């Protein structure tokens, strides 16, 4: 094993030799920033000091920020493995977060590993990490018997930065020690602190002026697509597109896309949408719409970009400054034979202004057809204040207006929210009251239920016992009460408890979920109870299993009956080797009731994803999607789909994508008088594509 590590180390040192001189020389010429080293604290042990030392130095010039981090190491140091970009290395790492614009709840994240893997993403308050964002950061990794040194160059280009000099950058440093299973932060912050996680980052003053860069970028692409089912190809003009972007201002950017092709986006996973009153919420996976989503959509459901299925053109302007942010987006959807979407116009506007401790946010959204015979507008104003340290208070009021094409009448509606929050390293409290009347419409959003008042309260505490067998506890209590907005009659009320715990920090984790309450449906009240137990482990990347099982009793809307059911979810993630990973998840529902002509009492759905990645710029992703939900009266017996997407980055300018997608419905039937059962897969779509992208 030592020989392998030495070989990997030598190869890593050889590969960075071209960068080492450049980074070191640039660092020497740059301005050293004033930074007083603090103690990295154990996140799981009330920030007890890290047993190994860490020294950091920062430099800056007009083009880059530089960081030098010298960390002590011992026999527990883990080299990890080589991996594709934005993929975990399964070893020790140093992570740096930069908050370049105060009070925007937005951070750039850079990860540094012993073998020089690259992992970078942006992090917002209301959305998950956005790995589609990439930076041209470089670093060297130098390892001796007692120290691990990182020398990094992080370009300002493409980041939200201040126009004045000096300006402050908030930094958060994290060290993960794989074999100890512990994470150490400086300053002493955790994500559960909400907005305070960003606001209490260490302020690093940058006295140099950031160079202005127009940063023009263009990408032309053509997708040769062929319909294997109908034996036909698509018109070239319909699958030729262009992306263009430039920065006319220090923090302002304009991005334009013409006929973006999303054929290389994986299929959406199969999720539980078989017994719900709510519209499914699909995570946005297209970078053009996902970027700046935290600023554009706020905390409401008035804007949902997945409604824009296949835009012909979309343009976006964003301006991000320390006290002000502005986002404007317009898109024209188009109908294609493979889609059933509309060809409407979509427009969105977001403005945020910081006034002392107040943050004022204004949102406006519009959807309309080409002749404007139909249109829907929504506007909302939100005021947020961070008061008394860890406390926050927010008020929001929204107004909608709609005119349907079949009616000359305009219909208006209102909605509003008041919310209070408290969050520190140990406790989180959230209280909110919302109302939405029976005429509110947001067709560019995702709102399932209207005409209701909703009251939510939740409390979570975090307890840590690093030396105990059960080392980490997280307990949550949630209460919800929903009433009819017009009559004030109760619609739903429930109480939920959740516990999540760890066994020896990394060995395993388990949880308990208990939920009970009642809901009204078609004038009748139904009670429900649910209890689930989960157990999993990420101790070994090569075998990370998880299972969640439970029983419950709830309302089946199609039958309008309360039924007992068994629920089981299991998944397995595995890093097979440094280049291959696999994930499988399966969900089973089984109800204590006989099957009907239109409803299935037992169904299973599953997802399988397999990825092969190489540092040379080639990667391959394969996936399967399956469910066996039956509709006996239609002989329908489920669905099966699969895809593969391959990508080859030939050079910095040229990229090729080859992909294939197939979807099929499954039918089971027998001929009259013939006892034999027949099975038929009816393929509904089957396409293969080759996409060529050229960047300038």
Image (spheres, rainbow, N blue to C red):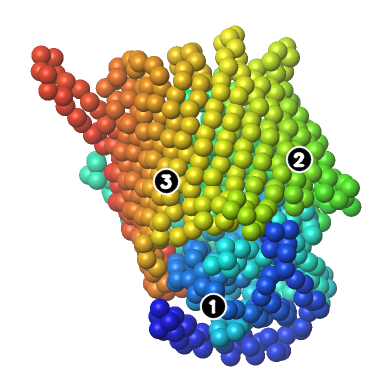
Q: Circle 2 sits in a helix, a strand or a loop, which is it? A: strand
**Considering only vertical position in the picture, is 634 above or below 179?**
above
- 11, 169: nearer the viewer: 11
Q: Residue at x 64, y 74 (%)?
A: 155
Residue 125 x, y percent position in the rendering: 68, 50
Could you say where residue 245 lies in the image, as x and y percent from the top left? Answer: 59, 62
SS class, disc 1: loop
Q: In the visual, does 404 lie left or right of 89?
A: right
Residue 502 position (above or below residue 516) = below
> Which residue is labeled 1 in the image?
75
Query: Residue 429: which disc?
Result: 2
First in residue order: circle 2 vs circle 1: 1
Mark 1 nearby-residue class (10 Å; few <14, some 14–19, many ≥20): few
Look at 40% across and 78% down and name the residue there. 1
Q: Quadrant of the rendered structure where residue 166 is?
A: bottom right
Residue at 89%, 52% in the rendered image: 356
Residue labelled with disc 3? 571
Give the image location of residue 533, x and y in percent.
51, 37
């Amino acid at each position: 094993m030592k020989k392998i590590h030495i070989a990997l180390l030598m190869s890593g040192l050889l590969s960075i030799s071209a960068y080492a001189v450049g980074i070191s020389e640039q660092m020497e010429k740059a301005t050293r920033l004033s930074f007083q080293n603090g103690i990295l604290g154990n996140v799981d042990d009330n920030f007890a000091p890290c047993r190994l030392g860490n020294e950091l130095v920062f430099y800056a010039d007009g083009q880059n920020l530089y960081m030098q981090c010298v960390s002590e190491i011992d026999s527990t140091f883990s080299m990890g493995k080589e991996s594709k970009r934005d993929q975990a290395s399964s070893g020790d790492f140093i992570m740096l977060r930069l908050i370049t614009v105060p009070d925007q709840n937005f951070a750039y994240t850079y990860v540094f590993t012993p073998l020089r893997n690259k992992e970078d993403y942006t992090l917002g308050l209301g959305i998950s990490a956005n790995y589609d964002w990439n930076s041209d950061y470089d670093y060297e990794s130098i390892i001796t018997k007692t120290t691990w040194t990182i020398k990094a160059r992080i370009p300002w280009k493409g980041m939200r930065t201040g126009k004045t000099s000096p300006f402050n950058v908030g930094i958060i440093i994290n060290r993960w020690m794989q074999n100890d299973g512990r994470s150490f932060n400086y300053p002493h912050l955790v994500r559960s602190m909400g907005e305070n996680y960003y606001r209490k980052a260490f302020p690093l003053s940058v006295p140099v002026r950031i160079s202005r860069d127009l940063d023009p970028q263009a990408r032309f692409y053509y997708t040769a697509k062929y319909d294997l089912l109908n034996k036909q190809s698509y018109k070239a003009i319909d699958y030729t597109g262009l992306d263009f972007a430039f920065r006319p201002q220090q923090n302002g950017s304009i991005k334009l896309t013409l006929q973006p092709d999303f054929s290389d986006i994986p299929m959406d996973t199969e999720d539980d949408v078989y017994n719900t009153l709510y519209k499914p919420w699909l995570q946005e996976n297209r970078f053009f719409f996902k970027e700046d989503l935290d600023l554009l959509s706020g905390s409401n459901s008035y804007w949902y970009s997945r409604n824009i299925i296949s835009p012909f053109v979309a343009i976006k302007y964003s301006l991000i400054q320390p006290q002000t942010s502005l986002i404007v987006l317009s898109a024209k959807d188009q109908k294609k034979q493979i889609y059933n979407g509309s060809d409407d116009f979509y427009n969105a506007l977001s403005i945020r202004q910081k006034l002392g401790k107040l943050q004022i946010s204004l949102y406006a959204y519009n959807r309309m057809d080409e002749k404007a015979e139909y249109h829907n507008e929504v506007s909302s104003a939100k005021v947020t204040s961070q008061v008394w340290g860890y406390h926050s208070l927010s008020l929001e009021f929204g107004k909608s207006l709609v005119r349907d094409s079949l009616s000359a009448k305009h219909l208006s509606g209102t909605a509003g929210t008041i919310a209070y929050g408290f969050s520190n390293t140990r406790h989180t409290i959230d209280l909110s009251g919302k109302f939405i009347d029976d005429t509110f419409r947001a067709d560019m959003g995702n709102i399932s239920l209207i005409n209701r008042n909703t009251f939510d309260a939740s409390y979570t505490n975090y307890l840590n016992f690093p030396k105990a067998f059960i080392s980490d506890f997280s307990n949550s209590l949630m209460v919800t009460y929903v009433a009819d907005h017009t009559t004030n009659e109760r619609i739903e009320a429930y109480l939920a408890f959740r516990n999540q715990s760890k066994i020896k920090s990394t060995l395993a984790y388990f949880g308990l979920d208990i939920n009970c309450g009642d809901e009204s449906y078609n004038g009748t009240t139904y009670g429900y109870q649910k209890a689930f137990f989960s157990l999993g482990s990420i101790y070994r990347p090569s075998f990370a299993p998880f299972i969640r099982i439970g029983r419950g009793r709830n309302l089946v809307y199609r039958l309008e009956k309360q039924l007992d059911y068994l629920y089981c979810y299991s998944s397995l993630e595995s890093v097979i080797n440094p280049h291959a990973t696999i994930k499988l998840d399966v969900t089973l529902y089984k109800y204590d009731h006989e099957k009907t002509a239109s409803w299935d009492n037992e169904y299973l759905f599953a997802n399988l994803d397999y990825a092969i990645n190489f540092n040379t710029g080639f990667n391959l992703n394969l996936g399967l999607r399956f469910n066996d939900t039956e509709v006996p009266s239609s002989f329908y017996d489920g669905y099966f789909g699969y895809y593969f997407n391959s990508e080859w980055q030939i050079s910095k300018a040229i990229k090729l994508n080859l992909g294939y997608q197939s979807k099929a419905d499954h039918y089971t039937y027998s001929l009259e008088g013939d006892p034999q059962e027949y099975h038929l897969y009816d393929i509904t779509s089957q396409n293969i594509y080759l996409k060529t992208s050229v960047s300038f």
